[in-house]
Amino acid sequence: MVDECTKEISVSINELPIKGRANRAVIKMISGYFHVKPTNVKIIRGLSSRTKVVEIS
């Protein structure tokens, strides 16, 4: 779900935060939503947090 006012995306995943699985799931979901390759999505802040900042190139 995208909030147009704040430019925030809410993502729910079922992966556990073990060995980066949850982060990879977030990247995969965001890349699918924006129709870009997963390699073009980068978590730039919040690798170990529930709140993340991502960059899409």
Image (cartoon, helix red, strand yellow):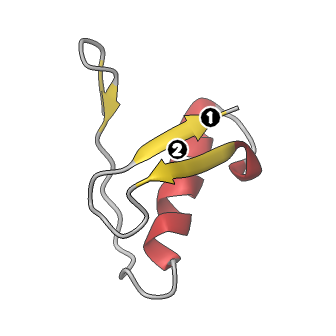
Could you tell whether 2 is left or right of 53 in the image?
Answer: left
Sequence order check, earlier mark of 2 and 1: 2
Residue lying at the far top of the rendered structure: 5
Which dot marks residue 1? none
Q: How far apart are marks 2 and 1 (CA)?
A: 9 Å
Could you tell whether 39 is left or right of 17 in the image?
Answer: right
- How many marks the image carries: the answer is 2
The N terminus: image quadrant:
top left
Residue lying at the far bottom of the rendered structure: 18
Could you tell whether 10 is left or right of 19 in the image?
Answer: left
Q: Which residue is drawn at 60% across and 43% down?
A: 32
Could you tell whether 1 is left or right of 32 in the image?
Answer: left
Residue lying at the far front of the rendered structure: 45
From this view, report whether residue 51 is shown above or below residue 4: below
Q: Mark 1 points at which residue?
A: 56
- Provide the secondary structure element on which disc 2 rests: helix
Q: Mark 2 points at which residue?
A: 30
Q: Position of residue 26 (x, y in %)?
A: 47, 57
- Would you say the residues marked 2 and 1 are in contact, meaning their CB atoms lie under 8 Å apart? yes
Amino acid type at circle 1 is: Ile
Q: Position of residue 20 (x, y in %)?
A: 51, 78
Q: Nearer the viewer, residue 57 or 4?
A: 57
Amino acid type at circle 2 is: Ile
- Provide the secondary structure element on which disc 1 rests: strand
From this view, report whether residue 6 is shown above or below residue 21: above
Q: Which residue is drawn at 27% across and 61% down?
A: 50
Q: Residue at x 61, y 49 (%)?
A: 42
The C terminus: image quadrant:
top right
Q: Where is residue 33 in the image (x, y as percent from the top left)?
A: 54, 37
Q: Residue at x 59, y 31 (%)?
A: 34
Q: Position of residue 56 (x, y in %)?
A: 62, 34
